[in-house]
Image (cartoon, helix red, strand yellow):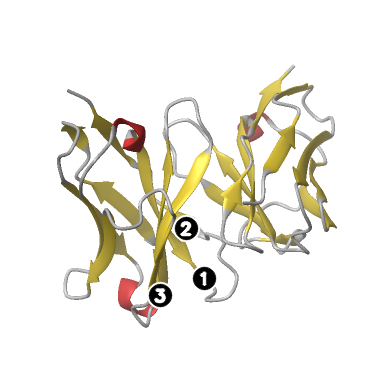
Amino acid sequence: EVQLVESGGGLIQPGGSLRLSCAASGFTVNSNHMSWVRQAPGKGLEWVSIIYSGDSTYYADSVKGRFTISRDNSKNTLYLQMNSLRAEDTAVYYCARVPDRTYWYFDLWGRGTLVTVSS
Amino acid sequence: EIVMTQSPATLSVSPGERATLSCRASQSVSSNLAWYQRKPGQAPRLLIYGASTRATGIPARFGGSGSGTEFTLTISSLQSEDVAVYYCQQYNNWITFGQGTRLEIK
């Protein structure tokens, strides 16, 4: 079955770090473009980051310099390393597959993992 | 940043009736627009991309139209399983999403 399963969310204090994982099955992450999208409580969806199959990466201004997207091809897993976390980073984080390098829409999503940044 | 505005916020439609959801962009996004469906506890699902192309496995009752700044998602005959929140997304200039329309059964 083709699917994405996120993990690694939880409660973290402001200024802390957390690494999210997204395990893929039914396809390989290294030959696809992959992305993270988040949704804060009561807010809309917000794109966070993308990694191309060729390893180029892009970030939303709100997370640039604090978050890092990466993947482990041997584990077929996508990651999001989140540092210097802020209260406004509290959200459900989704990983998603981007089927086209030029057109950034998402054809497969996971169910998400909740990150809560609070003291 | 391109702002996407969806209307209405909540839509109630009787089973078998047509549901029409709107999405407006603050500037032209050409046809670079997608629609998603999200049900509680489930992963979002791609319905439409390129403003009007149905994604793989999407029933024919879902249709997308529009270009530039005005877009519409139409569900021709509402089924109970279509109860969900629907989001539009532009990918013409980076990525932004609308706030969503909650679709309910009347």
In the image: residue B98, left or right of residue A87: right
Front residue of B47 and B101: B101
Q: Identify the residue at horizontal 41%, vertical 43% (top origin).
A: A38
Q: Earlier in the sequence, mark 1 or mark 3?
A: 3
Residue at the extreme top of the image, as rendered: B106
* Amino acid type shown at disc 1: Pro
Residue A109 position (above or below residue B4):
below
CA separation, marks 1 and 3? 10 Å
Mark 1, chain letter? A
Q: Earlier in the sequence, mark 3 or mark 2?
A: 3
Write down the residue under mark 2.
A108
Q: Identify the residue at horizontal 63%, vertical 62% (top origin).
A: B93
* Amino acid type shown at disc 3: Tyr
Quarter-of-image position of residue B5: top right
Q: Describe the element under mark 1 as helix, strand or loop.
A: loop
Write down the residue under mark 1.
A99
Residue A41: percent from the left, percent from the top?
Answer: 43, 27
Could you say which disc has been placed on residue A28 in the image?
none
Quarter-of-image position of residue A40: top left
Could you say which disc has been placed on residue A52 in the image?
3
